[in-house]
Image (cartoon, coloured by chain):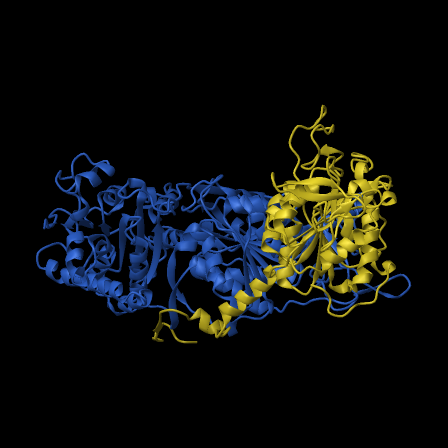
Chain colours: A blue, B yellow
Amino acid sequence: MATSAVKNPDAAPAAAESPEAVVVRFAGDSGDGMQLTGGQFTLSTALAGNDLATFPDFPAEIRAPQGTLFGVSAFQINFGSREINTAGDAPDVLVAMNPAALKVNLQSLKPGGLVIIDTGEFSKRNLDKAKYTVSPLDDGSLAKWDVLAFDISALTIEAVKPFGLGNKDALRSKNMWTLGLALWMFDRPRDPIEQWLKAKFKSKPDIADANIAALNAGHAYGETAELTGPLKKLHIDPVESAPGLYRTITGAEAISLGLVAGAQLAELPMFFGGYPITPASAILHHLARLKEFGVTTFQAEDEIAAICAAIGASYAGQLGITSSSGPGIALKTEAMGLAIMTELPLVIVNSQRGGPSTGLPTKTEQSDLYQAVYGRNGDAPMPVVSCSSPGDAFDCAIEAVRIATQYMTPVMLLTDGYIANAAEPWLVPDPDNYTPFPAKFLEKKNAKNADGDDTLLPYKRDATGKRPWIKPGTPDLMHRIGGIEKQVDTGHIDYAPDNHQAMTDIRINKVLGVDVPDQEVALGETSGKLVVVGWGSTYGPIRRAVDNARRKGLDVSHIHVRHIWPLPKNLGPLLHSYDNVLVPEMNTGQFKTVLRDQFLVDATPLTKTSGQPFAIAELEEAIGKYFDNIPGNEGGEVAVNDTQLPSPEPDA
Amino acid sequence: MNAPVKFETTLKDWETDQEVRWCPGCGDYAILKAVQRTLPQLGCDPKNTVFISGIGCSSRFPYYMESYGFHTIHGRAPAVATGVKLANPDLDVWLVTGDGDGLSIGGNHMMHVLRRNVNMQIMLFNNEIYGLTKGQSSPTSRIGTKSPSTPIGSYDRPANPCAFALGSGARFVARGFDISKKLPEVLIAAHAHQGAAFIEIFQNCIVYNKDVFEAFAVPKGAGDHQLWLEHGEPMLFGDPKVGMDKGIALDTETLELKVVSVVDGDWQSAGVLVHDQTNRSIVHMLVEMEFGPFPMALGVLYDDPRPTFEAAVIEERAKSSAGKEANLAKLLAKGQTWTVEASEGHPTD
């Protein structure tokens, strides 16, 4: 067995013995089970009381050819004893299960970081597939890092030998061996993983036992290797968090639970129409298992049928919901217009991904904001709510349901591939703390005609501007609705010029009148030199970058917008109270355009469309530039100095 | 679903106060009257009746029916109707569509509503033309149809709506035409069928495709040109004045249908087939039977019910939620959890 453990004498320590936070990336072939390893490591980390954020990064191909560069799947986790906002810019520890995983991920590893390598996969054939002419284990190219290279494959086969598995099956436990080692490194208990393995392989106890044996072997290896190499046991203290019950949650789970909670608060059965698409399908999968909550899930023949069936269900008195990702949302667009015209409640969840067209199905982006706010034929206003983190997605889903049912309108709920897949610890909310908003249906005629008789006006509005919701099956309220322009009040077909003007204004004003909470400042002051304005999944990196900058004494604040449309009424004046407005987005500057248009504010874009979230360092650099002209602060890279950057006086 | 109790209405009760806006002489008027005449016979209750349509001349239909109505978007009515039926299976849903709406832009939805077997009546008005958009050739237009989009005649092969429906897995397929007195009978059979009931209704577009069905739809010569199918009855047709002197038989050599002469009413010895509305193989031949050499097959061609989609969805929902409690607080706290105790820095309140 070729074990090499090289401690680089020049490299800075990868992490102190009890660091505040550590970033670990598990990388392997897409068949190696890295997402599973990462998921279980996340759970054990959460149970240890650390704050954390994760970033699963996997190929679009289901089973890319084994050992290839494009078949590499990775899972990154950042965990610590302080608040964690992102999955971390660069790993401290990289686990590379094959040459391709090493090649794809090595450059992001921090200098001096630790790389753990399975030499069992470093065959000539695998090196060729990863386009290595010489093995990186032999050519000195790993000198910048601490290297722990040994034959994990052989050790795994050895460990599961008693269970009589063939080599192929035995190697499937390799990820559990690796997980065992990682659990040892970070001083984590193995029990929860053992329980999970037993439950997962309930019907195949020998497979469960083999995996547990691999897990234990990896753990035991840690003890031995510690004596001779760079491997060190690290202990991360629990983070100080608000008291209460916690669990880990991904964005897709949180949205599903939030929609269920929203339906309960509205006192409505839920109808969910979906069509398989990455990364939105997870919501369909979650809800399909929650039928006892009055949920009907319908896998439609296409995206259009999914939204149309949801509209039909809303028309019949249920809460219609549909979900997709960018290209699927594009297909649903015409039907959104129908829901706007017929003024029926509907929630459309958009799990954004890289575009245009098929784009980058498994990579994240925020490039559907124009589509959400403007992307329909005609003047077709629609409220838009955006989630900023997995946990936040729960509350945003409830908010989307509230607006849809209280204003009789479709609502788009924006999330993205990063939020959908990422996990974070979540303080489990008490459903009793949410105020119910029961939906009301019209039960009898709502107006008088010229003769003083009771009559029905399906488009008569209440003080909030919404029309009544009328369920088919209600006696005496038969009426017809459709996509053709409606007459004010009666809802009859009406093409008259004045009527179309009136109805267009009514629809616009109804949506602009949606009650949206005032915008708060996430971090910092309500005025100052610079504000960083974000929306969606950029919350984590912006929060951390602004926090870091403020610790240096820079006068910068963070505003994160949940209500993209209508925008909070105080947002305009608030933005004008800062000297500079910086808008980082994972698109080419879409929200920046909306802000400029709505508030005539000189918003500066900071854009990124690489399919990867912002790194904290990228944002810190951008923030620093605003302070370049202040003497002593070129680049913003100075030590904390409270007197150095006093906040300017707010404008009179 | 059929109303369990017969509700008393008259034709007038089903008329709305809206001015009907089809062209004078349009076949749609006759279909509208036939439907308004049939619903009282069926004992339908307007409050539980929903007409759902797509886009096109036919799709204006809901505005003229004093029931619930939803005029949706082009081709999507089957999807909207599926949502309505899943949300409230007790509603009696009638889908109104046309050859362009139902077979071109909405062909996919039509296929799936049929194969899923959602319980509703689907009336496809086939006028072999796009009327509302001013006369372009449609997916059922015959080859050579001159239209603004095919000035020297269309050249794409037409679709056969009933063959499409049967191929999609429909369990009820019927045919009628606008001015036929037998149309209500067909509608009644469709309504009695539990599941998706597909009815192709030939409809005369007086402006853009006038009289394309004249060859079989006019009373003159109707006996020779119309084969009205009835379950358990021989497939006979012919001029009533001379008796039903022709029949449809199966050529056992080629496995194709053929027209045979019936002498002195002895259809048995002529080998005339008896219509079995559950015989899918023969029905496949009947829907493909070419008008000209053969009469037009009309009436209930196929009726062989299977469990409906709504029933399956309800059953699955019951199965999936059996023994489970709808407790949101428990759901939110599901999986592995941990508790953070209150400390000085974080008071519980």
Camera sees residue A513: no
Question: Farthest residue in the top direction?
Answer: B152
Q: Which of the two residues, A59 or A55, is positioned nearer the viewer here?
A: A59
Q: Is residue A421 above or below residue A358?
A: below
Percent across and percent down for residue A334 are 63, 45
Instruction: Report the front residue among A470 and B117.
Output: B117
Q: Is residue A210 left or right of residue A258?
A: left
- Can residue A151 be seen at all in this image of the molecule? yes
Residue A649, how many percent across, how many down?
Answer: 47, 52
The structure residue drawn at horizontal position 43% and vertical position 69%, both measured from the top left corner, is A428
For this rendering, which residue is in front, A392 or A307? Answer: A307
Residue A36 lies left or right of residue A578; in this view the side is: left
User: How far across and down, in percent of the image, does residue B85 sit?
Assistant: 64, 60
Numbered label tally: 0
In this view, the residue in front, A105 or A568, is A105
Left or right: A42 in relation to B6: left
Q: Residue at x 49, y 75 (%)?
A: B325
* Image spot of residue B247 (x, y percent): 74, 44
Residue lying furthest left: A228
